Amino acid sequence: MNFPQKILLLINTLSKHRFLLIILLGIVVLLIFSNITQYFLYKRGEAVRQEMLNTFTNTSAEIASLRASITDPLETQKLLKIEEHLQARLDNWNSSPIFDWKWDWKRLFPKGVFFTTKDEGISKHFSALVHGVVGEYALVVEKETSKLHLFQFQEHGTSLLKTFPCVVGKNKQDKQQEGDMATPVGVYFLISHIPEKNLPEIYGAGAFVLNYPSLFDYKIGKNGYGIWLHGHPRDQKLGEDKTSTNGCVVVSNENLLELAKKIEVMQTPIIITEHLSPVNATTANNTKKEIEEFIDTWHQAWESRDTNKFINLYAPSYINNQGLNLQQFKTQKARIAASNRNIAVGISDIFILTTGRENDIFVVKFKQSYSSDRFSSSSNKLLYIRKTGGIWKVVGESVY
């Protein structure tokens, strides 16, 4: 039986079952009506969206004009915050489709048009996560909310993959000394893993060791040791029986095992902050650009063997993990520059991170390869930089 004959047979069968035919025709009509309705809703939604964008754009322009005519610093600051908020919304809406509509035979009734913003997911910018290697992960602990966020760096911003409950020290202040029951605030890296079999039962499914205290912690007088990300005793419930720590960050054993699949020892950062703050794309990109330009200048100055030019990028209070102050460091660099005709420095896999606190330092982590006439090496480099008086300076430096 060929295809036309099959069609004729189907029509003949349906003609004998008029009730079934009416139902099928009704479904077809309903499907067509549903999609046509959604199409017009979509078109109306697009028009509303454009009106909103125009309104925000005009308002932002008016605020910028008003700000230019005001001399009061306090009022200017207020207007800047409003302008940043408007720009953030514009960046958000312009970078993603707000309305989602397509012809769909599965739809029986109009579902309307729904906003699908990027409030969670790709292309969000946070003050703590300025830049990272695309595809790599970062952990951010919010002490204020007792949450641990798993992020992945993307081409433009970051993607929030998942949020986990966690427990931190009962002392909610920044850690200052051993035994103060506080979890430190800062930018750290997970530098080693200790499996469950090598630990007492209180650590649950294992532990990741943070590089606390960091060089900068030492520099500002913090002490203590043994700050880990770890599990909890299997006979306790996180947040109920297990409500605080001695300063570590604790997640459930199940979640620790999930996180372990994403963590790369010596590479994955963990940022501990009081509160994770979003920033608009313009602010994030400007900060990233400034720091990248500073690192490029730093890199070129080192390779040039011009010691004065190189040391001018360092703060007077500088110290490194060898214990050298600025003058001692300058003497060392001058001796190396004089004894080598060529110095080559390679930089890759750059991360730019901070806690997001006002006037805090930024940690620039990268893989560094170094070669001169007499020596070559490779290492993970950490530069601690701070902007003072509009100028970036290195305040600390270490390798691991």
Image: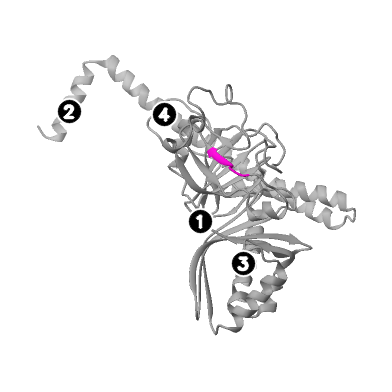
Q: Which mark is residue 133?
A: 1
| Tag 2–tag 3 contact (CB < 8 Å) | no
Looking at the image, the residue that sits furthest to the right is 72
| Tag 4–tag 1 contact (CB < 8 Å) | no
Q: On the image, numbered disc 2 is attached to which residue?
A: 8
Q: Amino acid at mark 4?
A: Arg
10 Å crowding of disc 2: few (<14), some (14-19), many (20+): few
Nearer the N terminus, badge 2 or badge 3?
A: 2
Q: Amino acid at mark 2?
A: Leu
Q: Amino acid at mark 1?
A: Val
Q: Marks 1/3: CA distance?
A: 16 Å
Q: On the image, numbered disc 3 is attached to which residue?
A: 295
Q: Is residue 210 left or right of residue 390?
A: left
Q: On screen, 222 above or below 143? A: below
Q: On the image, numbered disc 4 is attached to which residue?
A: 107
Residue at the spot 24% in from the left edge and 15% down from the top edge: 17
Nearer the N terminus, badge 1 or badge 3?
A: 1
Q: Amino acid at mark 3?
A: Ile
Nearer the N terminus, badge 4 or badge 1?
A: 4
* Circle nearer the viewer, 4 or 2: 4
Q: Which residues are magenta?
A: 225-229
Looking at the image, the residue that sits furthest to the left is 1
10 Å crowding of disc 3: few (<14), some (14-19), many (20+): many
Asked which secondary structure carries label 1, the reply is: loop
